[in-house]
Image (cartoon, coloured by chain):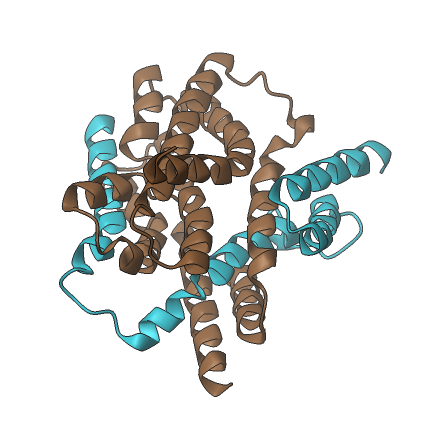
Chain colours: A brown, B cyan
Amino acid sequence: MSEKTKQFWAGVRAEVPLLIGVFPFGMIYGALALNAGLSKPAAQMMSSIVFAGSAQFVTTQLVHEAAPGLVIVLTIAVVNLRHVLYSASLAPYLAPVSTRWKTLLSYLLTDEAYAPTILKYEKEEVTPHGHWFLFGAGLALWTIWQISTALGIFLGTAIPESWSLDFALPLTFIAMVVPVLKNRPAIAAALSAGIIALLAYSLPYKLGLILAALVGITVGTFMEGRE
Amino acid sequence: MNIWLVMLLGGVITFGMRFSLIYLFGRFQVPETMRRALHYVPPAVLSAIVFPELLLRDSVLDVSFDNLRLLAGSFAILVAWFSKNTLITILAGMIALFLLQYFL
C-alpha cells in the first residue's frame, strides 16, 4: 500500500467513531429542515453547500421563524467563526501542499474532521503525505453527512426520541478531549473554556462558544508561559 | 432573499473562513506565541461544546442526580480516562444513559 493510501485510510478509520455520532445528527437535521419548510432539494443541498452541522440547525430554525435572508447569512458567519481557529491551527501542517489541495481540504474542514487530524499532526509533526489523512477523515464525514441527511429527509420525524442518539456527539467530544488533558495548562484551558461556555451560553449566535474557546486558549498559553 | 442565495452566501463565507489562514500561512509567518496558543484550541473548543451539553438542561444549570446526561457523561469521562478509546467511551456513555433512563 502506498503512503498516500495508508494515510487516507488512517484518516477514514480515525473518523469512524465520530461518524456514529454524526449519523443521527444528520438524520435529525434532515427531518427538522423539512419540518421547518425547506424543500427537499434545499434541505439536501444545504448539507453540501454549507456543510456545517450547527450552522445548518440554526439556519433551519431561522427559516422556520421566517427571518430575513441577510440575518441568516450573518448568523451562519458568526456560528462558523470558530473555523478560522481551525484554519489557523492546521495551517502550519498544510503549508507545503498545493493551493488546489488547500481549497479541497478547506471545504472538508469541519469540527469532526479537525479533531482527529490535529491530534494526529501534533503527535507526528509534518509528514510528506499527511494531508491525505485529513482528506480521508473529511471525505468520510462528507459522505456520511450527505447520506444521513437524505435518510433524515425521507424518514422524516419517525425517529423515537427515547433513543437519545444525539448524545453520541458530546460523548465523542469527551472521548477526544480527555486524552489531551496531559498537563496543567491543558487542563486549565479545558476547565476555563467549559466554565465560560456555561456562563456565556445565553449569548446569541453561539458567541458563547467562541468567547469560551478564546478564554481557554489564553489561559492555557499564559500558564505554559509561566511554567 | 431566496433560500438558495442564502445558502450560497453562507457556504461561501463558511468556506472563506476555513480557507483563510490555511491559504495565508504561505505568505505570513505565524508568531511563536500564536503557534503555542493553537495547541490549546482542541481542549478549549471541545470543552466549550461538552460542558453545556452535560451541565445545562433547557439553558439552565442542572447539577443534580436528575440530570441523566451529566451522570452518563461523567461516567464516559472516567471510561475515556482509563480506556483512551473513542468507541468504548461512546458505547459506555450511550449504554449508561439508556440504563439510567430505563431505571430512573
Nearer to us in this view, A217 or B88: B88
Q: Residue furthest front?
A: A1
| Among the 4 quarters of the image, the one containing residue B69 | top right
Q: Residue furthest right?
A: B103
Nearer to us in this view, A75 or A95: A95
**Can residue A61 be seen in the rendering of this structure?**
no
Which residue occupies 23% across, 56% down? Answer: A95
Nearer to us in this view, B82 or A67: B82
Measuring from the top left, give residue A126's x and y in whole percent.
33, 57
Give the total number of marks visible in the rendering: 0
Q: Residue furthest left?
A: B27
Q: Is residue B6 left or right of residue B104?
A: left
| Quadrant where the image shows the N terminus of chain B | top left
Q: Is residue A85 left or right of residue B42?
A: left
Q: Is residue B104 left or right of residue A41?
A: right
| Quadrant where the image shows the C terminus of chain B | top right
Measuring from the top left, give residue A107's x and y in whole percent.
27, 39
In the figure, B80 relative to A221: above or below?
above
Measuring from the top left, give residue A40's x and y in whole percent.
35, 16
Which residue occupies 68% across, 56% down? Answer: B81
Measuring from the top left, give residue A63's x and y in whole percent.
35, 31
